[in-house]
Amino acid sequence: MHASESPPWMARVLLIRPCAGHEPTLERALSSSRVLASVAPEARVVLAVASFQDNAFPVAVRVQQLLAIEGLAASVQETQATTPNAKSGQLAAVLTQEAADVILVADSDVELGEAELRGLLRTLSCPKVSAAWVPPAEVGPCKTWGDRASQALLGSSLHAFPVLSGIDRAGMVGKLFAVKRTALEAVGGFEALTDVLGEDMELARRLAGRGFRVEVVPLLARSLAVGRSVGAAVERYTRWLQVIRAQRPALLLTYPLLFFPTLPLLLLSVAAPLHPWVAWTTAVLALAGRLWVAMVARILVDRSAPRGGLGVDVMLADLLLMASFVRALSRRTVEWRGRTLAITPRGRLVARTIGAALPVLLAVWLSVTSALALPAVGEMGKNVDLEDADGKVIKLETLVGKPILIVYEDKDSTKMNQSFKDELSKLAKGDKYKDKVALAAVADLTAYNYWPIKGFVKDSIREESKKLGTTIFCDWTGHVQVSYAFRKKTSSVVLLNKQGRVIFASEGKMSAEQRKQVIDLLRAEVEGK
């Protein structure tokens, strides 16, 4: 058989590239799908976007045209996926339209190579194997400290997936994987994974539970991801550890012992009342073992030493994993592509809930009944908890009797409605309004709800509250955001009348007419007009 020909059972190979947003390396990564033409010439490629309004759509169209020139049957599909797990929703939507015997899935930041695709298809040619995956590694340039920390974790620690795949054979990382459709349908398809965080791990678990075999291909899935902040890196690995917490809780307990024991051991050797030779032996063995792991990981991911060398990588990797571990233990919500989702005790994702602070039943009820837009004029306001930087909590309903002005913002939107806040500040200088209007200025702090960052943010909020002369409330869990359907990265303004009903609601930059409307409504409420 010619090397470029596919075996008969593999004649219908489908490559799906789910996309969302315009990532810096999106076009390069998607364009690499052209190598499929030399691996499986009959294969089809689907570039999946949730909506044609998505920023990834024009890039996907350009790439589709390029692939067509290369001789590949390629299309751009609008999936309209709105599921909690957007990736599973997109994959499920594509497969309702496409026939295939083998489904290849590659994330939008993965640069494909012939070797990896051949390895996946060759592995699946074994009748006993139902799914195969390639361990990911990050190969993009380090443009930020977030990039450097992430690459250090995946390339200089025990968490490097080429290393981890040899230790833990039960998992699967879905950056680049392939699955036989018969096996996929036997476990419910991607439709059954649309409310699961960590669809790849769950898919592997379900396949194994039905007696199907999952194999790792000992190559590298090259991720081009770049431009991430440290906070984004922490959030990403928090999600990974939340997957472990939800699906394999016993495994999570091993992380401090296996993945980042070096710093605790060094502190123990210094602080504990040990005999000097015991302390020195502990410190030397801890450092030597950690450096050996880093060197092995670097060899396996073919990563050269960046600026600062191995020591900096070791420190960054361990600190990143430690911060993510603590955050994963303390949260039952997850930040994912601009949405706050709650994780139930069984590991299901619940869209637009208030998280684990309230009973799961209430969280599920809110996910079903809460609107996908701001509350409409005439609706009753939500009785949310308002927490200040010192942890003191008041109920919004205790402010009823006065008009209540809610201003909800995050760090990216504080300047968006500065003109309105300036006008409001002038109005508040008069005693008539200062005592007769309840201002609920709420900051979206869900991205900082972990130790030790949370403490620093609290100090900053206290200082800002003192400077402005008003309390800034903290939304650590997304409770206020979800209850009022506020969107991230934008400024939202809601005005409630004295009875607690919505009389104005706006998101985004307010026009001069909107600002005047709010001020007039406030005056009418205060002066009884």
Image (spheres, rainbow, N blue to C red):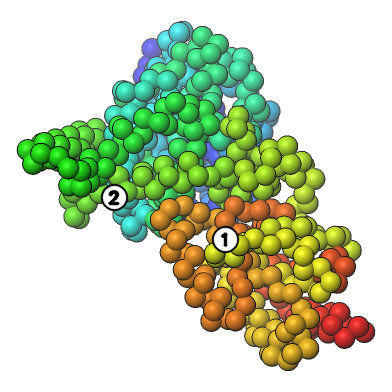
Residue occupying image coordinates x 44% and y 17%: 214
Q: Amino acid at mark 1?
A: Gly
| Residue that mark 2 sits on | 316
Residue 120, quarter of picture: top left
Q: Could you say where residue 118 lies in the image, as x and y percent from the top left?
A: 38, 24
State whether residue 446 is above or below residue 32.
below
Residue 368, quarter of picture: top right
At mark 1, the secondary structure is: loop
> Marks 1 and 2: CB-CB under 8 Å?
no
Q: Could you say where residue 146 lies in the image, as x and y percent from the top left?
A: 37, 54
Residue occupying image coordinates x 33% and y 57%: 145
User: Taking the image as drawn, is residue 323 in sight?
Assistant: yes
Residue 391 marker: 1
Q: Quadrant of the C terminus?
A: bottom right
Dot in front, 1 or 2: 1
At mark 2, the secondary structure is: helix
Instruction: Report how far apart the C-alphas of labels 1 and 2 lie in the structure.
Output: 31 Å
State whether residue 246 is above or below residue 154.
above
Q: Could you say where residue 67 lies in the image, as x and y percent from the top left?
A: 50, 40
Q: Amino acid at mark 2?
A: Leu
